[in-house]
Amino acid sequence: MNSEIQSSKPGGTLYIVATPIGNLDDLSSRAIAVLSSVALVAAEDTRHSGRMLQALAVETRMMALHDHNERDRAERVLQTLEDGDDVALISDAGTPLISDPGFVLVREARKRGIRVSPVPGPCAIVAALCAAGLPTDRFAFEGFLPSKKGARAATLDRLSAEAATLIFYESPHRILDSVADIVEAMGPDRELVIARELTKTFETFYAGPASEVLQALQNDPHGSRGEFVIMMHGAEKEAADVGMEEADRLLNLLLQELPVKKAAKLVAEITGKAKNDLYQRALALKDR
């Protein structure tokens, strides 16, 4: 039997339930039914999610499961599932596991043959992207940018030649610094769209060249408040091509002193390009 096919053995189901990112009316009727029927709700923050469940008149027992205790608490959740009871996993907002806890639990549940079922719903990156007016045929979600300036600059430099639309989450106390670094790394004219407080009363989109978006945030008295999704137009094809030219230049230099595999690995770390692709290019360059 293919190990990727979920087992049909008796047991509970782990439901991955998306919850609202702001507007409670975005919670689906199916999500409410699941939250009402399961034996346990594993929540990132029981106080925050408890208020939501109370508003829905859902009285299901809750357990805190977050980044700091997931490895310890996962076993208790798995035992509940193996005993035949259903469990719902929720995060503070949006779809669990998308820059939220749950990976350890879901991965172990699948290893044990426990049924894992998604209950789709709100997701901030999808909600923001569909309203941004940026290309959606290819996009890359990079999570949160690093908190320290040096690491953030290195990440942005690595992504500067990426042709896909780039998406980041950012916190209010770092939003201005991050956008300033984007202007520096990507140039003042790179198209940028920032969504703030999605689905909430003060939902706002800032759009335009990166330098103008930074100015708009600085001029807005609420520009450093709320939750942010940063979306960036990918590099133009010419820029992406230049990025590969630079990769080839680095490969040629390193191949004078290093084996193919080591050279490809180092250039992948420097440029952010796929190691396997660089390995094949290094082989071709060496053969020349």
Image (cartoon, rainbow, N blue to C red):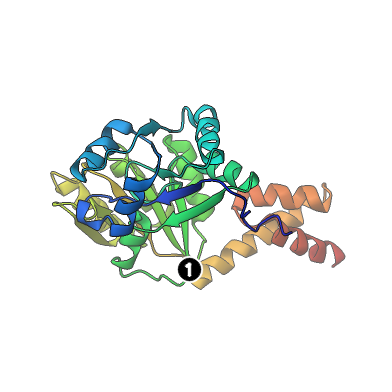
Q: Is residue 88 visible?
A: yes
Quarter placement of the N terminus: bottom right
Q: Is residue 25 above or below residue 60?
A: below
Instruction: Count residues near mark 1 (Cα–Cα under 10 Å), then give few for <14, some for 14-19, many for 20+.
Output: few
As rendered, which of 121 and 156 lies closer to the eye? 121
Is residue 122 or residue 30 the one in the foreground? Answer: 30
Image location (x, y in percent) of residue 92 = 33, 41
Relative to 159, is 212 on the left or the right? left
In this orientation, does residue 179 appear?
A: no
Q: Residue 192 placed where, x, y %?
A: 33, 60
For the image, the number of numbered tags is 1
Left-right relation of 158 to 17: right
Q: In the figure, residue 167 lies in which quadrant? A: bottom left
Asked if 69 appears above or below 168 in the picture, the reply is above
**Residue at the image position 33 percent from the left and 58 percent from the top:** 30
Using the image, determine if residue 214 lies above or below residue 176: below
Task: Determine the residue positioned at 27% across, 38% down.
Answer: 59
42 sits left or right of 157 in the view? left
Of helix, strand and loop, which one carries label 1? loop
User: Could you tell me which residue is drawn at 48 percent across and 68 percent down?
Assistant: 138
Residue 232 image point, x, y percent: 38, 60
Of all residues, the one furthest to the right in this rendering is 287
The residue that label 1 is drawn on is: 138
Q: Position of residue 162 (x, y in %)?
A: 51, 61
Identify the image quadrant of the C terminus. bottom right
Give 25 or 213, whichever is nearer the viewer: 25
Three-letter amino acid code at disc 1?
Answer: Arg
